[in-house]
Image: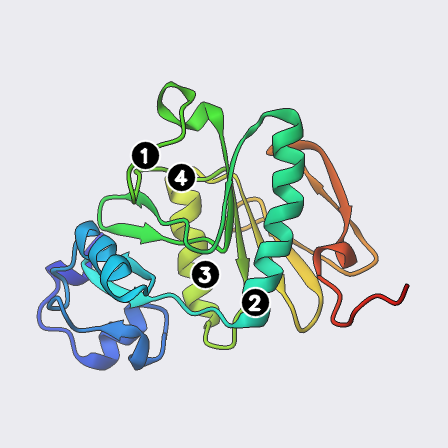
Amino acid sequence: MATISTISPLTLAELVERLGGVPLDRIRCRPALGTATVQDVIDIQAREERLCELIDGVLVEKVMGLPESRIGTWIGTIINRFVMTHDLGAVTGADGTMQLYPDRVRIPDVAFTSWERMPDEEFPSTAVPLLSPDLAVEVLSEGNTPRELELKRQDYFESGTRLVWQIDPRRKTVTVYRSLTDSQIFREQDQLGGGEVLPGFSIKVSELFPPQRRRQP
């Protein structure tokens, strides 16, 4: 498959289309388009405290607002409690950068990775490990585009991810993807299970969303 770095020349419109229609202000032009590396992802995070995904040599800034961050943290805490209880692996959050395969770095909002996926069943110490999660959770943000999310799911499944949850904060739904073509929408009153990825895990969808107001005593 041709990549951005091997197609020349690309118009700006073609580049944006290949990246899933993301807004221009999220596409970084330095390093030069098509030349960015995993090390650039690491350097920018250290220097600017900004998170970037790497797509065929192009850096695209990750978008996430405060409400989405809170939901991601809430969900990560719920999953982590279950994972720790059963010693299943590791849960990472919205800055958990993973190199799914060469020239592709993605940052799920929440991810679960089983011990079996890690070399020697040990959590990696590198900043951007070559690692694909068992479960990737994406919380929809205003700046996301449908095509961008579709491309992310494609990357996840091609790298070996077994389950993707797409969280819609506005509709209070979870779309569960078991493959690129197998999906199911779960609504607030539905019970969501972990399937073969998190066997025994079950929660009501409404409980995946934190309260908006303080609970009265």
CA distance separating discs 1 and 4? 15 Å
Give the residue number, with chain letter if any, for mark 4. Answer: 132
Mark 4 vs mark 2: in front: 2
Sequence-first tag of 1 and 4: 1
Q: Position of residue 197 (x, y in %)?
A: 59, 34
Judged left or right of residue 41, residue 189 is: right
Q: Which residue is mark 3?
A: 150
Q: Nearer the viewer, residue 108 or 65?
A: 65
Q: Comparing marks 2 and 3, which lies closer to the viewer?
A: 2
Instruction: Kindly identify which residue carries mark 1.
Output: 125
Residue at the disc numbered 2: 68
Residue nearest the observer in this picture, 47 or 16: 47
Q: Position of residue 144 (x, y in %)?
A: 46, 72
Quadrant assignment for the C terminus: bottom right
Disc 1 and disc 3 in contact, CB within 8 angstroms: no
Residue 156 lies, in percent from the top left, at 42, 47
Sequence-wise first label, 4 or 2: 2
**Mark whose residue sits in front, 2 or 1:** 1
